[in-house]
Image (tube, grey):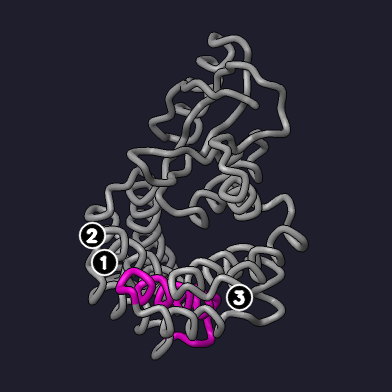
Amino acid sequence: MKLSLKKKFPLSLFLISYAAFAAGPMESGETYFLKARYGLAASSYSKALTYDINDNNRANCWYMLGQSYLMMGEFSKAKDAFSKITAKYPKTDWLAGAYIGLGDVYYHEKKYDSAIKYYEKTMTSKYLSQHGSSIYYRLAKAHRAKNYITKAKYYEGIIRDKYPDSLESRISLQNKSGSSSSRSAYSSSKKHAVQVAFSTRADFAQDCSNKYKKKGYDAYVDVISYKGKTRYRILVGRYKSKEAAEFLQKKIRTKEKVEAFVTTITDN
């Protein structure tokens, strides 16, 4: 006796399996993005969009597509990706991120008034409670670019007062003092850590660090100068012994599937 396809494979199972296929490209996209392989990240997120995923995941893909294009300097494509969220998915969790992305595009195009307009769109109490330091930091940078120093200092003051432990606060204090150190709370010594990612963006570095913290790792962001530009290393651990750092490196490579490596840090 022949069984119908529906009896052999319930429709719900097809839908679950189909959605599961989309998770693979999204995870690959995130991995490629953190490795600064933005072209591959864009391809992965574009592939995920071909699957039947919900609006929030679809907006997530468009957001990361926008960020990937932004990193590659393809500002027109980035703007289109972020605008897709504001036009089609305004009720998702990614609307404020899309505004930030559009502000970043305009900032890179040196259209600072437009950048400020989009940054200000994100200033709801909910979003400020989660990302206030990042928003105020962008507003300060945009106002400094327009040479509105008083306004820039106002936003920098908010960061130091309301978000003293934030990455943006450390960057602000570092720029103010002219110090090259980002971890002044520790005594001066050479130690070893495991680098799990590297970013040109403070917000992505902080997000990556938070993900590792939630998994129980002693993760943090180290601000460095690379070829005259500010860059961000996402590090885990702080050991006097290189062997201890190498043990953690192997654990992270096995468990998290990332190309972690041991590096040195100097606590000042």
What element does badge 2 sit on? helix
| Residue 233 rendering spot, x and y as whole percentages | 48, 38
Q: Is residue 185 left or right of residue 17?
A: right
Q: Main secondary structure of the magenta part?
A: helix
Residue at label 3?
Answer: 151
Q: Please give the name of the residue rendered at 43% of the width and 76% of the height, measured from the top-left corner.
A: 103
Mark 3 crowdedness (10 Å alpha carbons): few <14, some 14-19, many ≥20: some
Q: Secondary structure at mark 1?
A: helix
Callout count: 3
Cα distance between the residues tagged 2 and 3: 40 Å
Q: Are discs 1 and 2 less than 8 Å apart at CB?
A: yes
SS at mark 3 in the image: helix
The residue that appears at 63% across and 80% down in the rendered structure is 123
**Depth order, front residue of 131/168:** 168
| In-image side of 189 versus 30 (left or right) | right
Q: Which residue lies under the disc numbered 2?
A: 43
Q: CA distance from mark 1 to mark 2?
A: 5 Å
